[in-house]
Amino acid sequence: MDKTVQTAAAAIDDIANGATLLVGGFGLSGNPENLIAALHRRGTIGIRLVSNNAGTDNCGLGVLLQAKQVTTMVGSYVGENKEFERQFLSGELEVELCPQGTLAERLRAAGAGIPAFYTPTGVGTLRAEGRETREFGGRTYLLEEALHGDFAFVKAWKGDTHGNLVFRKTARNFNPLVAKAAKVTIAEVEHLVPAGELDPDEIHLPGIYVQRIIKGESYEKWIEQRTTRPRTEG
C-alpha cells in the first residue's frame, strides 16, 4: 500500500512521448511544480496536455511550452502565456479551447465512467461545429465526450503514504478532477505523513485514485499578475 516514490524523476520516468497528460492547477495556484520540472528535465515530447491553463511564460506549465514539449493543448484559459500565443498563431501548437465548466465536467465524467453528456454551453458557437446536438424540453444541447488521460499530475497540501490527499483553499481547483480521470495519477505534496495520521473526515481525495506520491520541495509563491497603485503622500 505504500505508494511513496523518492524522487519526482523516478515518479515520471515511464511517461512516454505522445502521452496524454492531465494537470491540476488554476492559474499559478495548485501547480504540481516538482513533477512539471522533472518532466521538463526528462525531455518528454509530443505531449497532449490537458489543463485549465497554460501557466505563464516561465512558470507552471509554461516551462513545457517554452521547451516545445507540448504538441496539443486542451484548456479553457490561456491568456497569460505569450509563448503559447506565438506557437498557436504560427501553427506549431494544436489548441482545443473548451469552456471551463465543460472542461471540468468532461474530466468528472471520465472519472465517473460516463462516456459523454449533453450541455447547452457552446451551442451556436464555433464549439458546436461538426458536433452532435439534440433537443431536450425545447432547448438545444451539445454532446461533449469524457476526457481521459494516460497520466495525471496533482498537487496537494498534505498526503499520506497510501495516497490520501488534503488540498488547501484555491489549490483544490482542478486537482481532484484530473486525478480521477487518468490511468496513472502522480501526486506531490508539501507534507507527507504516515498512513493513518490524516483524519478520514478531512480527506478530499481517497488514495484509491493515486498510484504514486512524492514529497515536493522548494515551492514558489508566484504572482500571476502584480497590480499596484501609486503611493499617496500624507
Image (cartoon, helix red, strand yellow):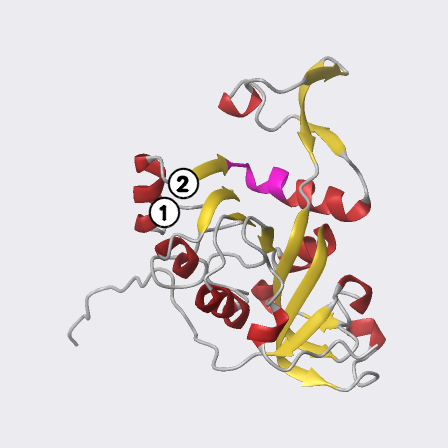
The quarter of the picture where the N terminus appears is bottom right
- From where the camera sits, is residue 156 visible? no
Per the rendered image, the range of residues in magenta is 97-103
Q: Position of residue 64 (x, y in %)?
A: 43, 58
Mark 1: few, some, or many residues within 10 Å (few <14, many ≥20)? many
Report the residue marked by disc 2: 93
In the displayed structure, would residue 28 be above or below residue 111? below
- Give the residue type that dot 2 points to: Leu
Crowding near the residue tagged with mark 2, few <14, some 14–19, many ≥20 C-alpha atoms within 10 Å: some
Q: Residue at x 35, y 35 (%)?
A: 91
Where's residue 197, x and y in %? 80, 86
* Contact between labelled residues 1 and 2, with CB atoms less than 8 Å apart: yes
Query: Distance of mark 2 from mark 1, alpha carbons?
Result: 8 Å
Q: Which residue is mark 1?
A: 84
Of labels 2 and 1, earlier in sequence is 1
In the figure, is residue 81 to the left or right of 203? Answer: left
| Element marked by disc 1 | helix
- Please state the horizontal and vertical placement of residue 68, each as a whole percent of the image: 38, 52
Q: Nearer the viewer, residue 115 or 174?
A: 115
